[in-house]
Image (tube, helix red, strand yellow):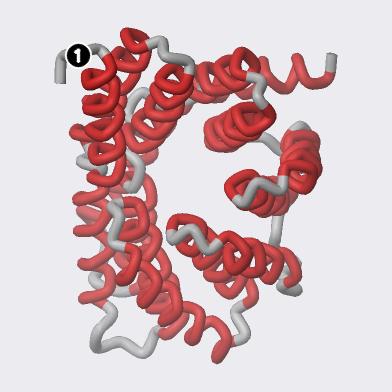
Amino acid sequence: MKNRSLIVIFLIMGLSGFAQNQKIIDSLTNQLAVAKPDTSMVSIMLRLAIQYTYAKPDSALLYAEKAVNLLQDKKADKWKGNAFRIQGLINREIGNLPLALELTLKSLRIGLELENYKEIRRCYNGLGNIYLDLMDYQKSISFFQLARNVPDNTKTKDEEAGLLMNIGNAYVENNQLDSASYYLNEAFHLFSQSVNGNSGIFMYRNLGKLQVKLGNQKEALNYYLKSIEVCGQEDYRNLAATNNKIAMLFLAGKQIDSCIYYAENALSYGQRGPFRVMILESGKLLAEAFKLKNQY
């Protein structure tokens, strides 16, 4: 019953996510129009960059670069560290992992110098995600664990759950399924105490990936579909990612028409970003599907 209640909460939050994000963007854009060229303007630009990351990464990168340029002649190391980390996050999303790694390490050095524990924690988490994409899963897990162990008293239950989820996801990728199940379940139940719309997108997708590895295809599909249900209408990155996962599931089951349907969905969402990594993945799935259908 508790899990069902949590699913309902995720769904409700997902339905309202799009409207809330657009309101935030509109509000920040209005604030930027009247802001003075100081750290208050930098703050607004970086918040806009975050809002655009999963919908329009090119716009996100533009705002982050403007913030960095504004900081060039200012003694504001805390803000520079924050800006470099956000630039790293966006570059990871568009698939530029070398630059993402360089920028995140640059931010981490500043955080360590300033003993800014919140920024240190976020940098370790970012490094964990980058090494996850590089398929160095042990190093990824090590960075996520480092993030958990940072003595940051500002960390929320939601953020702790996010770290547990990231560790679980890395264990899924490394085929350590008992550990993956433990951390994902811990994250799921912690999210029940502090939940937001974004939590459900990643939580359900990661649970779906676990079920694929466990051989439970029907359960995996259910989780993937829930991830899509709670996704914002303009969260093109995550809509593309989850549609690709469903396409992979159907390809493995030789359900070629269903694979093509979801891969084409993913391609369409990926192109709207554009999110080149997602586009490439969709293209490979479609090529394999049409080959199997003798339409290649």
Residue underneath mark 1: 294
Name the residue at 58% across, 60% down.
137
Tell me if 37 is positioned left or right of 248 in this view.
left
Local SS, label 1: loop
Rendered location of residue 84, percent (x, y): 37, 73
Q: Is residue 95 above or below residue 291?
A: below
Tell me if 240 is positioned left or right of 176 in this view.
left
State the quadrant of the N terminus. Answer: top right
Rendered location of residue 246, percent (x, y): 45, 22
Q: Is residue 100 above or below residue 250?
A: below
Name the residue at 28% across, 18% down.
292
Q: Nearer the viewer, residue 36 or 90?
A: 90
Tell me if 18 is positioned left or right of 64 in this view.
right
Tag count: 1
Q: Is residue 272 above or below residue 27?
A: above
The part of the image, by quadrant, that contains residue 155 is: bottom right
The part of the image, by quadrant, that contains residue 278 is: top left
